[in-house]
Amino acid sequence: MKAIVLNQESFKLEIREVENPIISHLDVLVRLKAASINHHELWSLQEKKLSSDSNIIMGSDGAGIIMETGTGVNNLKKGDEVIINPSLNWGANNKVQGEGYEILGFPTNGTFAEYIAIDQQYICHKPKHLSFQESAALPLAALTAFRAFFNRGEFKKGNRVLITGIGSGVALFALKFAVALEAEVYVTSGNDHKILRAIELGAKGGVNYKDSDWSAKLLQMAKGFDVVIDSAAGKGFKELTEMTNPGGRIALFGRTAGNIENLSPSTIFWKQISIHGTTMGNKEEFKKMIDFVSSNKIRPVIDSIYSIQEINLAFDKMAKGEQFGKIVINMDKFNNDI
Ligand SMILES: NC(=O)c1ccc[n+]([C@@H]2O[C@H](COP(=O)([O-])OP(=O)(O)OC[C@H]3O[C@@H](n4cnc5c(N)ncnc54)[C@H](OP(=O)(O)O)[C@@H]3O)[C@@H](O)[C@H]2O)c1
């Protein structure tokens, strides 16, 4: 088959002929129709840390059609339209992933390929109201947002919510979930146009985190938050603790703006704020996320759709932070080289 393989010298992606995946008795073989890209793949390309003796096929997100099932597969059949859960080997503890945990795409071969062989436990039927491209936008980002918002952020009806860096794929899923539950949501962004687009999607307001008085402006609008969803960390995290209401929760899942500085311990302990690290989610959360998306007819925000041949351009766009929502790759036409 053809696959998009990491060139381990240039750290660019290129199309190569690789061996077909072989299914074991609990696996299914999926023909990918669409994939999407995530910031963690961009970190891998930029930080040049991945290495392997064999081809590295990255890609955590994918949707496609089952072509073949292993002898032990019961509830799935050839022709089923499915999406893939990239959160592999979570382990027995719901609170945290175990030592064998990995995200699909490295070291296990990922979705940037014509076919993938994967254990049936990581397969769900795609939501009926979504196309393959929309379904491929879901897995990693929507799962992360779901756990951050419901489990680690402990959202309750009536809570006021702040979501930072709203251009991010994960942040926009958190916005969609919060709006579906009629929460009062505010956002930050480095781009005023993205704030306006978030308001169109149901946010009550937002501020530009590049403004020196962004947190004062936000407090004027909203007077404190019960749930904060943050993937930036960095210098601005201190202000997030100051804007969190007594008893509030901050769910943190990223490091886009770097290390956290100058936190005031008394702000945290006196207001009894909980800062909850969160990463991806387990199998049950993935299924609950798909059910929530289906029952609320949620549609992902898709920034753009690229061809396979344009995948390096797609990552260039993400590196510039220009996107609003998920960047999807159409996996149908592997004909030409990049
Ligand atoms: N732990 C996990 O399980 C997990 C899962 C998924 C992602 N992540 C992490 O979460 C982050 C976002 O991932 P993604 O795939 O959604 O990325 P993405 O689509 O590339 O979005 C990154 C976003 O970061 C925002 N940002 C940049 N500087 C910021 C700042 N100083 N303050 C607030 N926001 C800032 C930008 O928002 P604006 O464009 O609106 O300014 C940008 O859209 C990455 O760090 C990624 O590694 C972690």
Image: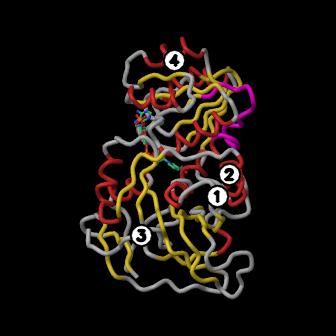
Question: Mark 2 or mark 3, which is nearer the start of the sequence?
Answer: 2
Callout 1 amino acid: Lys
Query: What residue appears at the point 38 percent right and 18 percent down from the top-left corner?
Result: 212
Within the displayed image, which quadrant is ligand 1 positioned in? Answer: top left
Check if mark 1's residue and mark 2's residue have beta carbons within 8 Å: yes
Question: Mark 2 or mark 1, which is nearer the start of the sequence?
Answer: 1
Check if mark 4's residue and mark 2's residue have beta carbons within 8 Å: no
Question: Mark 3 or mark 1, which is nearer the start of the sequence?
Answer: 1
Query: What residue appears at the point 49 percent right and 23 percent down from the top-left corner?
Result: 206
Which quadrant of the figure contains the C terminus?
Answer: bottom left
Callout 4 amino acid: Leu
- Note whether ligand 1 is within 8 Å of mark 4: no
Mark 1 surroundings: few (<14), some (14-19) or many (≥20) residues within 10 A: few
Question: Mark 4 or mark 1, which is nearer the start of the sequence?
Answer: 1
Toward the viewer: 119 or 182? 182
Residues under labels 3 and 2: Cα distance?
Answer: 25 Å
The residue pinned by badge 3 equals 332
Residues under labels 1 and 2: Cα distance?
Answer: 7 Å
Question: Mark 4 or mark 3, which is nearer the start of the sequence?
Answer: 4
Question: Mark 2 or mark 4, which is nearer the start of the sequence?
Answer: 4
The residue pinned by badge 1 equals 128
Toward the viewer: 81 or 140? 81
The question of residue 59 being in magenta is answered with no
Residue 218 marker: 4
Query: What residue appears at the point 64 percent right and 57 percent down from the top-left corner?
Result: 127
Residues under labels 1 and 4: Cα distance?
Answer: 38 Å
Residues under labels 4 and 2: Cα distance?
Answer: 33 Å
Q: Is residue 266 visible?
A: no
* Image-based side of 76 in relation to 262, left or right: right
Q: Which residues are magenta?
A: 149-161
Indicate the quadrant where residue 49 lies: bottom left
Badge 4 marks a residue whose secondary structure is helix
